[in-house]
Amino acid sequence: MKRRSWIQASFLLCTTVLTSCSRDQGQGDEILIGEYGSLTGTTATFGISTMNGIEMALDEVNQSGGLLGKTVRVIVEDDQGRPEEAQTVVTKLITRDRVVALLGEVASSRTLAAAPVAQQMGIPMVSPSSTNPAVTEVGDFIFRVCFIDPFQGLVMAKFAAQSLQLTDVAVLRDIKNDYSVGLADVFVENFRTLGGTIVADEGYSEGDTDFSAQLTSIRARRPQAIFVPGYYTEVGLIARQAKSLGIEVPLLGGDGWDSPSLVEIGGAALEGSYFSNHYSVDDPSPAIQKFVGDYRDRYGATPDALAGLGYDAAQILFDAIRRAGSADPTAIRDALAQTKDFAGVTGVTTLDENRNAVKPAVVLQVNDGKLVYVETINP
Ligand code: PHE
């Protein structure tokens, strides 16, 4: 028994060593990168927009000769928007496809499920858009290229209290979603500090379709706005049901609203609502306008923030591989940690000692079915 487990242990050790020895040398003339995201399910536009942005960055790098004399290939896996599936596909990308780095996920709960695998196997992971603080706390192989929720929640609390001059706000949060719970907590804390009152704090779960009980009790508390830090499918349904219950106040939210489907689902019920986001397509900066134009030509759609963040995350990873001068995962990790003043479409990225980016946020308003720029808030 003892002997057998010793043999098993040394076999494991050998395979681990072999994997790490051959990972960067055994890929021939290609550099393999893994991408995982929700290409299906209630957050499908998150994965699809991110994939489009990554694909644009990939074509650009390969058209200019690739990296380290090799072609870059991205292997994409659909996690169907499920945390367990995210963990499964990331394990597969690392052990079977032997990728040297990972891009993903969008949703914090899914990144949190998969990141421990990457950390343990020593493969760097760059999340384009997971904003929950715990994501990069998983370890030194986990990075993100976006701002975090303590900032985003403060932005929306200030916007509610100061720009809109609101005093009474209700909260409706997704209680099974790390992002939603974390962002709701930050909003509540800051809104109270700014003198506001949270008149109701209700919960739902992703996949719910009937919100009438929560909305009825919120209505009774007469809020001036409802903060709904969820994802676009539920937010759209909540907006419609709030309207049909006679609730006329605006909804407020965070980046999870960002989707071409938001207004399709919520329709006119979302008019006048506000949410924070990572960039605005109305920004006149030449870099953003070029990206928006190229993306429209290619996909026939306006790039949402996820497309921009996917593009930037891929560019930042490619830049790190170039600077590392090697496709060794640890060398890539070390180079990623040194990312400084990288100018992308979602702003300038410098990764701090906690592997987070510090970037401005924008507030957008739903106006005539479009997302209209309201203001930029600097960190
Ligand atoms: N920030 C969200 C999360 O952490 C994901 C998201 C980012 C969704 C940007 C839409 C746009 O879960």
Image: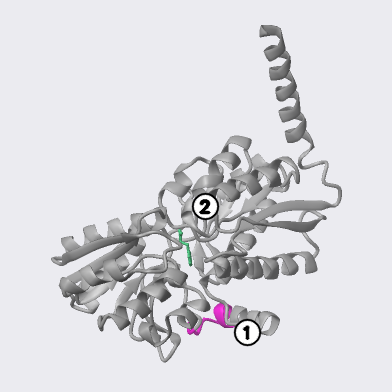
Q: Quadrant of the C terminus?
A: bottom left
Who's the residue at 56% across and 56% down the image?
Answer: 105
Who's the residue at 42% across and 76% down the image?
Answer: 236
Q: Residue 252: image x %, image y %? A: 32, 73
Q: Residue 224: image x %, image y %? A: 20, 77
Badge 1 element: helix
Q: Quadrant of the N terminus?
A: top right
Q: Residue 126: image x %, image y %? A: 57, 53
Vertical order, 29 against 364 (above or below) = above
Vertical order, 161 against 247 (above or below) = above
Is residue 117 among the parts visible in the rendering?
A: yes
Q: Disc 1 designates what residue? A: 293
309 vs 38, nearest the viewer: 38
Disc sitting over residue 110 in the figure = 2
Rate crowding at label 1 as few (under 14), some (14 to 19) or many (20 or more) other CA atoms within 10 Å.
some
Circle 1 or circle 2, nearest the eye: 2
Tell me: is circle 2 under 8 Å from ligand 1: yes
Q: CA gap, disc 1 to disc 2?
A: 31 Å
The residue range painted magenta reads 282-289
Rate crowding at label 2 as few (under 14), some (14 to 19) or many (20 or more) other CA atoms within 10 Å.
many
